[in-house]
């Protein structure tokens, strides 16, 4: 009789399955997919705010409006939201609701096909125009007879709303780049309403005074100087006036309460400390929330606090080299761009289509895309709309350069990282220990041209 030996009987040494019963595995710390590079938090210079409030003092600026108006839709019918009319230079500061309601009803809705002319250069500028939807190009004839695109208007933008009186002509042609809806208000009806409303008449007079006040090209109250003179003329007297109502930024907060059962912390903290691992993941999530707020918070976030004059539209749709050049030429000492990764990919596609190759730069040992020597950094906190559009930001940073600065407070109770503290809040009746994790922060734009935004760039094409 022949005996057949099994594989186990033939084995000459201990197999791995048995060996693992006496061995411990090599394990990683808990991983999470939410962690991003958080370039904004790393690139911003941070200012310690011991009092919790940061006041930005500026030179007096004669504000003349320039914000964006809002619209209400009823089917195909569009009506401007009356209170938002105060964003127009002519009506900035007007607080008469009846006048605003009347003006809102006087606007006439018009539809334009792509390529249609909305206003023509050299014709009387006898209307106030509001762009409801679509893209409107500002076109002018160049000095050599060629066609020059000065810029673009999008939903909420306006044209012809800076002149208080009738007369004058359009300096450029307004052309529909896409199908557009526009609301128009004849100036004749606007001035006819002043005979019925002393408040509106006074408002237009205030606007004339603002336009007549001496100012520099940035709208700041002028500091008068003399130059190029000879002899002993009487020199002008002057002073630098300050903004009487400077903006104050109070620190915001991202918080959560981490709960860890004491049995888990006591029995299962070797070789990894369970409490520390839980805190590490929680702190990462709080920091992600912090960057998201710095970008999108409606009170202090960068997207919502960019000056209207520093918001531009792309020339064709996707972000191209010309668009980023336009962002750069509107400010000095730009430190970095910030864009969603899909927007960066769209920019690369436009560069490839035009036969242009972007630069690269090294930051913290990493190679990143750059344009004109300015790094183009990814930030997935910048939203991408359902229509496939996003924004690209460019920042000048630092107090010394009157740029954008991050705000935080050092020495908060239980500080783990600058501006972030962890406080043990006790153990409840179920033997669950709690830890309060708090990050205090904000962001301030010291002067308007420190931040620029390229809006409505197509990332899906």
Image (cartoon, grey):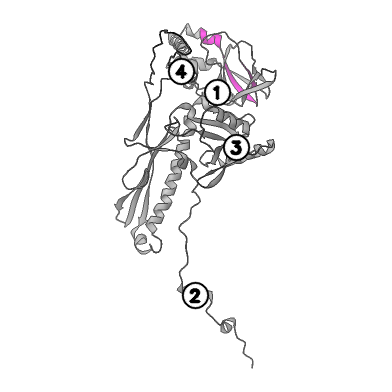
Q: Position of residue 264 (x, y in %)?
A: 37, 61
Question: Which numbered disc, 4 or 3, marks the residue that appears first in the sequence?
Answer: 4
| Residue 142 falls left or right of residue 329 | right
Name the residue at 62% across, 87% down.
Answer: 4
Residue 178 counted in the magenta span:
yes
Q: Which mark is residue 157?
A: 1
Q: Which residues are magenta?
A: 169-191
Residue marked by disc 4? 92
Q: Position of residue 306 (x, y in %)?
A: 49, 29
Spatial CA distance of label 4 from label 3 is: 33 Å
Question: Which numbered disc, 3 or 2, marks the residue that appears first in the sequence?
Answer: 2
Residue marked by disc 2? 19
Q: Position of residue 429 (x, y in %)?
A: 29, 55
- As helix, strand or loop, the secondary structure at mark 3 comes to loop
Q: Are marks 4 and 3 in contact (CB under 8 Å)?
A: no
Residue marked by disc 3? 388
Which corner quadrant holds the N terminus?
Answer: bottom right
| Residue 270 falls left or right of residue 390 | left
Q: Badge 2 local density, few (<14 within 10 Å), some, or many (20+)? A: few
Residue 184 location, quadrant: top right
């Amino acid at each position: 009789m022949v005996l057949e030996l099994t594989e186990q009987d033939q084995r000459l040494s201990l197999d791995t399955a048995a060996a693992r019963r006496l061995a411990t595995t090599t394990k990683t710390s808990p991983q999470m997919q939410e962690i991003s590079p958080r370039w904004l938090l790393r690139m911003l210079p941070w200012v310690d705010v011991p009092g919790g409030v940061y006041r930005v003092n500026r030179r007096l600026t004669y504000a003349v409006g320039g914000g964006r108006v809002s619209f209400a839709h009823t089917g195909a019918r569009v009506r401007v939201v009356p209170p938002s009319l105060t964003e127009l230079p002519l009506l900035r500061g007007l607080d008469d609701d009846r006048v605003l309601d009347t003006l809102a009803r006087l606007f006439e809705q018009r539809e334009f096909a792509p390529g249609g002319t909305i206003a023509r250069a050299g014709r009387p500028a006898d209307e106030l125009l509001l762009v409801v939807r679509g893209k409107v190009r500002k076109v002018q004839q160049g000095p050599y007879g060629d066609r020059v695109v000065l810029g673009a208007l999008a939903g909420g933008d306006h044209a012809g709303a800076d002149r208080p009186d009738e007369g004058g002509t359009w300096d450029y042609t307004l052309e529909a780049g896409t199908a557009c809806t526009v609301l128009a208000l004849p100036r004749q009806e606007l001035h006819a309403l002043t005979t019925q409303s002393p408040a509106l008449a006074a408002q237009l007079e205030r606007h004339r005074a603002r336009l007549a006040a001496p100012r520099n090209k940035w709208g700041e109250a002028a500091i008068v100087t003399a130059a190029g003179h000879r002899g002993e003329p009487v020199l002008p007297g002057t002073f630098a006036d300050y903004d009487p109502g400077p903006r104050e930024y109070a620190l915001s907060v991202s918080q959560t309460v981490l709960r860890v059962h004491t049995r888990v912390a006591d029995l299962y903290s070797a070789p990894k400390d369970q409490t520390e691992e839980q805190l590490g993941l929680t702190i990462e999530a709080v920091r992600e929330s912090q960057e998201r707020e710095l970008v999108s918070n409606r009170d202090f976030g960068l997207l919502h606090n960019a000056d209207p004059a520093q918001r531009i539209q792309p020339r064709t749709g996707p972000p191209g080299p010309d668009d980023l050049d336009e962002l750069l030429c509107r400010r000095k000492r730009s430190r970095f761009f910030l864009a969603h990764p899909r927007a960066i990919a769209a920019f690369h596609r436009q560069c490839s289509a035009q036969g242009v190759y972007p630069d690269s730069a090294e930051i913290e040992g990493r190679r990143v895309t750059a344009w004109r020597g300015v790094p183009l950094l990814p930030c997935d906190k910048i939203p991408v709309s359902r229509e496939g559009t996003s924004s690209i930001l460019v920042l000048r940073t630092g107090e010394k350069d009157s740029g954008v600065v991050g705000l935080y407070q050092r020495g908060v109770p239980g500080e783990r990282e600058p501006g972030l503290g962890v406080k043990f809040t006790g153990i409840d009746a179920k033997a669950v220990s709690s830890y309060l994790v708090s990050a205090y922060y904000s962001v301030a734009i010291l002067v308007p041209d420190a931040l620029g935004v390229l809006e409505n760039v197509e990332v899906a094409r």
